[in-house]
Image (cartoon, rainbow, N blue to C red):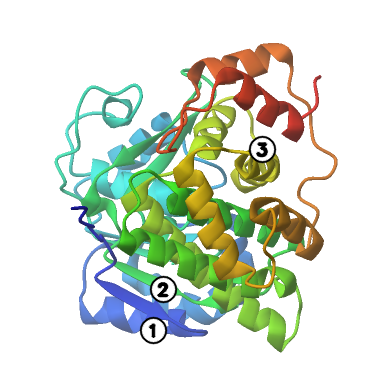
Amino acid sequence: MSTSLLIANRQLHFGRGSLQQLPALLGADPLPTLLFCNPSLQRGPHWATLDEALSPLLIGREVVTHEASPQEIDAWVSRWRGQARRIVAIGGGSVLDAAKAVAALCEQPLPCFRYLEKIGDTRLNGSTLPVIAVPTTAGTGSEATQNAVITDQAQRQVKASLRHENMVPAMAFLDASLLDSAPAPILAHCGIDAFTHLLEAWLSRTATRLTRESALQGMRLFMRAWPALAQQDAAGDEAREAMLLASWLGGQALSSAGLGVIHGLAGEIGAIKTWHHGEVCGRLLLPFLSLLNDSEHPQHQARVIELGEALFPLQHTAPARHLRDWLQQQACHPFWASPPTLSEEECDWILARANSKNSWVVWDREQCYALLRAAWPAA
């Protein structure tokens, strides 16, 4: 008998304009509060409406411009340990992950790298400052996950997670109005990341009835959102709200069911390349769907058939390949076009470290190499 564990936000505020409730919620429970955000937030219209009410409630502000390194996390922890008692994070996945990492490590005695998966030697004890997460992109689902991704390209060349179930933010705001000004490439890159989370959680060998239902509902929302994602009209507004919810469901599903070979490769690529993670996943997803279409593994066949019947009830042949074609035909931005290059040496480095994660099969080196080469030509 399989059982499911759902780890979720204690409070979720969903709907356009919901972020405007944040100052009143902070004021009702006064704590020294630190803000993590991205540079664009402070230049945008949403900050203009929040600044006067929110800034007096903050003890400081940190701006995150990229995926944080262990050294940056340690510097923030050193600056704010013992002062901050709550963290608000408003931004994309990198902002939310940095805030979650700092919140946890402010309550731990050792530096960041000691707790990192892949290279660390110590488990987090579960103590963390409360985090309020406000995503401004719809892709990573970090507002619903129990991990924070940390990237060190300079010293250790590793992209890995801090992880504990208590790192799921206590509160999250899903306010789709924060996505309205995002350019089409960002919407597409983040959206295809959300879909990859949902699909890999759906296919996972550790998936359960609960995680599959969450993943399927997320993929249905994605299908509604994908064609109109960048439109500046009522249909676009509805699409971005649907994608934000799909991303949140993807975060929940991956936290419980795990991911697959796409992320097994993408994580290693992220250790040496500054490419957008969602774009990396999307470029790998397209050839993976062709590979999946030809898989003879019984669980793959059953999951793909079931998914095809749910998403394309009138299409009865080659559902994975049909999905690949639909994703490209309906995209608001051709994320697969004009790829950069990967050298043979970089491919070897990636393949030596990549794994299939929670896939039903262990994809071999030849198959993984084919995925890399289908996504990126040789240098």
Q: Nearer the viewer, mark 2 or mark 1?
A: 2
Q: Earlier in the sequence, mark 2 or mark 1?
A: 1
Foreground pick, 236 / 132? 236
Query: Do the numbered discs 2 and 1 sit on residues whose CB atoms are within 8 Å?
Result: yes
Q: Earlier in the sequence, mark 3 or mark 2?
A: 2
Q: On screen, 244 above or below 265? A: below
Q: Which residue is mark 1?
A: 21
Element at label 3: loop
Q: Quadrant of the C terminus?
A: top right
Q: Earlier in the sequence, mark 3 or mark 1?
A: 1
Foreground pick, 298 / 208? 298
Foreground pick, 85 / 263? 263
Quick check: can you spot residue 227? yes
Q: Residue at x 62, y 25 (%)?
A: 367
Q: Residue at x 62, y 72 (%)?
A: 313
Disc 1 packing (10 Å; few <14; some 14–19; many ≥20):
few
Q: Which residue is mark 3?
A: 275
The amino acid pointed to by label 2 is: Phe
The picture places residue 356, in percent across and down from the top left corner, at 47, 31
Element at label 1: helix
Q: On screen, 115 above or below 141? A: above
The picture places residue 268, in percent across and down from the top left corner, at 53, 27
Q: Which residue is mark 2?
A: 173
The amino acid pointed to by label 3 is: Trp
